[in-house]
Amino acid sequence: MVRYNLIRKMDIADGPGVRVSIFFQGCHFHCEECFNEETWDFNGGKEFTSEVIDRILDLAKEDYIEGLSILGGEPMNPVNRPGSLEVAKAFRNKYPNKNIWMWSGYIFEDIKNEEIFKYIDVLVDGQYKKDLHDFRLKWRGSSNQRVIDIPKSIKSNKTVLLEGEN
């Protein structure tokens, strides 16, 4: 069963502008010094339902909301993939002009064929590495992580970094 930990209705830390963010529950990576350890337990949090998606869509209706951020835990863990896809698809259908960012410990090349990438604009990929931490980085915690432009990557069939963010 898909679970989530938290929904932020006005997040300014996880992507550009003011956003709605959902943190999925459950992560198997357990990165050392993770900023979000409370999301590791797959049995924690709350049940992810269609009402949760409706709430996210309602919170995003204001013009000042620039987009949706999907984080965790690990939104691309096989347990969480259906929920991540469902919320991304619903958000894209309702708000085609708003953007969707996602953070995952998986490397893009390993998951690039997943259906969710039809809906995602930006993926920050790779596990957080404490020894590569750099507080000057934008949108990521360690230098091994990449900020990827998904539509350009899909179109060119190669990983394209988001201009100005890496």
Image: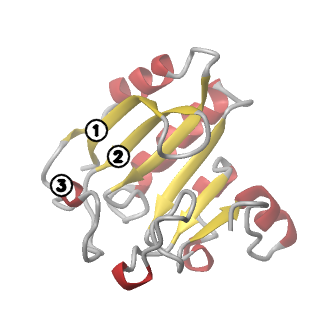
Q: Please, what secondary structure does the residue beneath circle 2 have?
A: strand
Residue at left 52%, top 33%? Answer: 19
Amino acid on which the number 3 mark rests in the picture: Glu
In x, y percent, where is residue 153?
A: 77, 67
Q: Secondary structure at mark 3?
A: helix
Q: Amino acid at mark 2?
A: Phe
Q: 44 above or below 123? A: above
The residue that appears at 34% across and 34% down in the rendered structure is 7
Q: Which residue is mark 1?
A: 6
Q: Spatial distance from mark 2 to mark 3, Cα to Cα?
A: 10 Å
**Residue 38 circle label:** 3
For the point 57% across and 59% down, the residue is: 138
Mark 2–mark 1 CB contact (< 8 Å): yes
Percent from the top left, x then y, of residue 99? 66, 39
Say which label, 2 or 3, has the lower sequence index. Answer: 2
Image position of 79 (left or right of 124): left
The residue at the far bottom in this view is 131
Q: Residues within 10 Å of mark 2 (few under 14, many from 20)?
A: many
| Picture quadrant of residue 109 | bottom right
> Which residue is disc 2 drawn over?
23
Locate residue 50 relative to residue 15 in the image: left or right.
Answer: left
Label ID, residue 110: none
Between 6 and 49, which is closer to the camera in this rendering? Answer: 6
Q: Residue at x 46, y 47 (%)?
A: 70
In this view, the residue farthest toward the front is 136
- Of pointers 2 and 1, the one earlier in the residue sequence: 1
| Residue 162 locus on image (x, y percent) | 74, 61
The number of discs equals 3
The type of colouring in the image is: secondary structure
Height in image: 14 above or below 49?
Answer: below
Give amino acid for label 1: Leu
Give whichever of 52, 130 is nearer the camera: 130
